């Protein structure tokens, strides 16, 4: 578990270093995720300790968003004045994104399958 | 006395975990009723508590930051489910890329449209448009397009909450059953929380959600700054 956390943190640090060095508008952890993926690809397997640390973190991931969410109280004024725009934008935008992404992927998968299977 | 308690990092930390554990219990009792989303309930309860006790957010966050910090390694950890399902990524590259692209583009456009219809000021619109990108990245993009970083982060978390709560039900309505498609949609729209939620369905869905989250963040980070010059 500890070894797994050490690996995760090492890759996060690597990601932060790259983001800082190249001034990318990206988050260090996302680059770290890509680097870790590449590393595992190179190894051809997931390290045992890494697996348990990752699975534990991911199983409990939801709680990690609470502190930022509570931060909304700092912007009470913004929410008071603009709650309607925010509510509609958040809800409608999310619905549009989910529906479009899912249906597009589904249709394209079907098209691919239809092309691959010869018509009898 | 409450104020003094909250001055130690321990109290906000214990409070957050405790409230969340309670929220999970309530969620389980209601058999996963969408509005009984643990994050939504915890955030609401904590905001109410802090408002009533007049404890400033900074004091709360001084303790809660130890939980917040784990978001970093957790994001990196998403590489593991992704690795386990990489083979399917290779065979379905087109549906994946176009699905993510169409989803995030249509979402961003609808936000710009809604902001315009309601006459929202540019700063608000700019903070809203990155809502489908994971919080740390939307914070990074925001200043480049005229938005407020911390506000953008909150809109991202809010979107994640809504998507995680209602996304699966929406997908059911649309008849989307394939775990890859469900994962892609959740990750594109509601990033981290969406991934956390869809991981409960299957590791495969979680892997694609993580992939979608990463690619959406990358695409938005690269394209939005340039596009904003045209639109906003």
Image (cartoon, coloured by chain):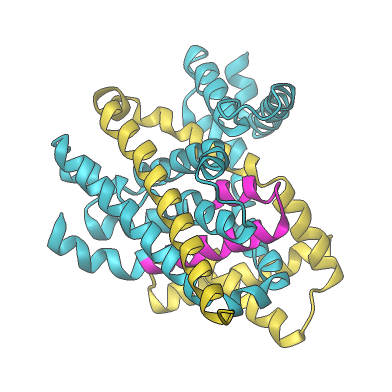
Residue B19 visible in image: yes
Q: Where in the figure is residue B50, as x and y percent of width and height?
A: 52, 20
Residue A28 visible in image: no
At 39% from the left and 65% from the top, the residue drawn is B101
Left or right: where does residue A100 sit relative to residue B213? left
Q: Where in the figure is residue A108, as x and y percent of width and height?
A: 47, 68
Q: Residue furthest front?
A: A120
Q: Colour of chain B?
A: cyan
At 25% from the left and 65% from the top, the residue drawn is B225
Q: Is residue B204 magenta?
A: yes
Looking at the rendered image, the quarter that the N terminus of chain B falls into is top right
Q: Where in the figure is residue A68, as x and y percent of width and height?
A: 50, 40
Please tell me whether residue A111 is drawn above or below residue B36 in the rendered image.
below
Front-most of residues A113 and B139: A113
Left or right: where does residue A86 sit relative to residue A110? left
Looking at the rendered image, the quarter that the C terminus of chain B falls into is bottom left
Q: Where in the figure is residue A6, as x and y percent of width and height?
A: 75, 66
User: What are the residue bounds of the magenta stretch?
Assistant: B192-219
Q: Is residue A31 magenta?
A: no
Left or right: where does residue B85 sit relative to residue B46? right
């Amino acid at each position: 578990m500890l070894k797994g956390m050490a690996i995760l943190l090492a890759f996060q640090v690597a990601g932060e270093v790259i983001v800082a060095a190249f001034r990318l508008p990206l988050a260090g952890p996302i680059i770290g995720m890509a680097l870790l993926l590449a590393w595992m690809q190179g190894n051809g397997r997931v390290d045992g300790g890494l697996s348990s640390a990752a699975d534990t973190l991911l199983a409990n991931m939801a709680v990690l968003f609470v502190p930022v969410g509570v931060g909304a109280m700092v912007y009470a004024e913004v929410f008071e004045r603009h709650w309607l725009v925010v509510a509609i934008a958040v809800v409608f935008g999310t619905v549009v994104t989910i529906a479009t992404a899912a249906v597009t992927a589904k249709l394209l998968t079907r098209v691919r399958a239809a092309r691959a299977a010869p018509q009898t | 006395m409450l104020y003094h308690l909250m001055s130690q990092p321990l109290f906000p930390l214990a409070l957050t975990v405790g409230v969340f554990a309670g929220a999970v219990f309530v969620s389980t009792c209601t058999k996963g009723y969408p509005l009984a989303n643990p994050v939504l309930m915890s955030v609401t309860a904590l905001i109410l508590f802090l408002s009533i006790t007049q404890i400033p957010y900074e004091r709360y966050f001084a303790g809660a930051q130890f939980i917040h910090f784990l978001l970093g390694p957790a994001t990196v950890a998403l590489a593991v489910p992704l690795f386990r399902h990489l083979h399917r990524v290779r065979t379905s590259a087109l549906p994946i890329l176009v699905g993510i692209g169409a989803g995030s583009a249509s979402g961003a456009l609808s936000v710009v449209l809604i902001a315009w219809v309601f006459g929202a000021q540019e700063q608000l619109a700019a903070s809203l448009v990155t809502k489908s990108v994971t919080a740390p990245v939307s914070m990074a993009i925001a200043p480049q397009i005229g938005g407020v970083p911390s506000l953008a982060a909150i809109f991202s978390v809010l979107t994640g909450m809504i998507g995680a709560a209602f996304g699966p039900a929406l997908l059911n309505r649309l008849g989307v059953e394939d775990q890859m498609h469900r994962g892609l949609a959740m990750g594109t729209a509601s990033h981290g929380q969406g991934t956390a939620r869809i991981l409960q369905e299957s590791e495969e869905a979680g892997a694609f959600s993580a992939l979608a989250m990463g690619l959406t963040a990358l695409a938005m980070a690269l394209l939005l700054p340039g596009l904003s010059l045209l639109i906003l």
